[in-house]
Amino acid sequence: METPDELLPVSVITGFLGSGKTTLLNRLLRHADMADTAVVINEFGEIGIDNALVEQSDDDVMLMSSGCLCCTIRGELVDTLRNLYIRRVKNEVPEFRRLVIETTGLADPAPILHTLMADPFLVMRYRLDGVITTVDAVNGDATLDNHVEAVKQAAVADRVLITKSDLADEAGMTALADRLRQLNPAVSVHRVRHGEIEPADLFDAGLYNPETKSLDVRRWLKEEAYGDGDAHDHDHGHDHEHDHNDVNRHDDSIRAFCMYFDEPLSWQALATWMELLATYRGDDLLRVKGLLNLVETDKPVVIHGVQHLFHPPVTLAAWPGEDRRSRIVFITRNLPRETVADMLSALTDAAGSGGIKVHT
C-alpha cells in the first residue's frame, strides 16, 4: 500500500442548490495555488466556466489557465476516477496532486465517500481529505429548516463556507454559524464573499497532515469540540431556543457526541458492533471517527465510518498523548446516544470484556 503522503488527497464540495458552489468553483479555478489540482464535476455547462480560463480542452477534460484541470463525470464516479488516475500515470493529463469533487445541490455526499473508501483501486491511490459544504448566508436557515439533505451536508462537513456573506447582516450570520456548530461541533466555519477564499483554508482537513508528514489524529478527531472529556458524551443536537413544535426543523434529528472507554476494548466486539450498526442503522449513522485502545495491540487504532461503510482501520505508530482511553465521535440522525451506548455495552460484555463502561 502507498504511504499516506503518496496517496492523492480528495476533497468533496457539496451544498444545497443556490448555495454558491458554482461561484466558489469558478474562483478556485482561477487561483494559482490550484495548479496541481484536478476538479471533477457533473457537467462543464453546469458551473459556467469562463472560456477565458480554458487553455486547452477535449471531450471531457479542460486544462485551465491556472494550471489545474477540470473533467466531467462520465458514467460511474469510480470509472471516472480510475481513468483520470491512469491518464495521469500515462502523462496524458498534468500530474495533479490533489482532487476536488463537486456534487449536485441535492446530493448526499455519502455515496462519494463510499466510493473512495470501498473500491480497491481507489483505496490504494486516493485518500479522503475532507468534506466542504457551502451554506447560503441569506437563505441558509430556511434551507436547513425545509430540506433534510442540507442538514446532512452540514452535519458531515469538515469545512463549512457561509457564502454571500456580503448580503446578510452580522446577527443573522452569527446565529447561522452557531446553528451549524450545534449540528457539527468540530466543523471549521468560514465566511465567504463572491466565492473568494484561499485554497489553503479548504484543504488538508484529513487524518494525514502534510505539514508534519504524519497522521495527526488530534487535529482530525477534534474530540474537545464535543465537551469536556471528564463530563463525557455531550449532546449538541438541539437548539434549545427554537420551537420544538416546528415540524419543518430537521436539526432535532441530528446528534453529535463523543463516547469514552476507560479500559481497553476487544476488537472482536468492536468489529461486530460496526457491522451491526452499519447494517441495521447505517442510514442514520452519518459519520463516525474513533481512536481505540484495543486488547489485541499496544498501539492506537483509528476507525472512520460513513453510514453503511467503514474504512479499513489504521494503526498509528504511537499514542498522540498520555490519555489512552478509547474515544469515538458520532454524528447520527434519529439515532440516540443511549441506543449506541447500550449496543456497545452489550457487545463488549458478550465478548468477555467485563468492566468496560460506556460513559453517558
Image (cartoon, rainbow, N blue to C red):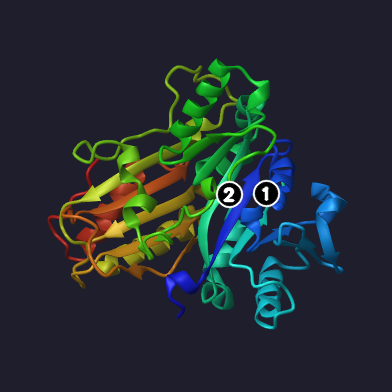
Tag shown at residue 28: 1
Decide if residue 138 is in sight here.
no
Question: Which label belongs to residue 206?
Answer: none
| Amino acid, disc 2 | Pro
Image location (x, y in percent) of residue 113: 56, 59
**Which amino acid lies under the numbered mark 1 shown in the image of this protein?**
Leu
In the rendering, at what x and y percent does residue 85 appear? 65, 75
Which residue is at the far bottom? 90
| Marker count (numbered) | 2
Whether 162 is drawn above or below 221: the answer is: above
- Mark 1, other Cα within 10 Å: few <14 / some 14–19 / many ≥20: many
Label 2 residue SS:
helix
Q: First in sequence, mark 2 or 1: give its number.
A: 1
Quarter of the image for the N terminus: give it: bottom left
Picture quarter with the C terminus: top left
Q: Which residue lies at the image location 34% right of the left edge and 66% below the top edge?
A: 271
Viewer-nearest residue: 155 or 336 = 155
Q: Kindly report the distance in space between the C-alpha atoms of the residues bearing marks 2 and 1.
A: 7 Å
Q: Label 2: few (<14), some or many (≥20) within 10 Å? A: some
**What residue is shown at x 87% (from left), y 68% (from top)?**
59
Q: Is residue 69 above or below residue 154?
A: below
Question: Can you say whether 70 is above or below 182 in the image?
Answer: below
- Say the numbered circle drawn on residue 199: 2
Do callouts 2 and 1 mark residues in contact (Cβ within 8 Å)?
yes
Q: Residue at 39%, 47% (x, y): give it.
A: 330
Residue 71, position in %: x, y?
A: 76, 63
Left or right: residue 191 compared with residue 356 = right
Out of 221 and 99, give the one closest to the viewer: 99
Say above or below: 33 vs 175: below
Secondary structure found at label 1 = helix
Relative depth, front residue between 42 and 37? 37
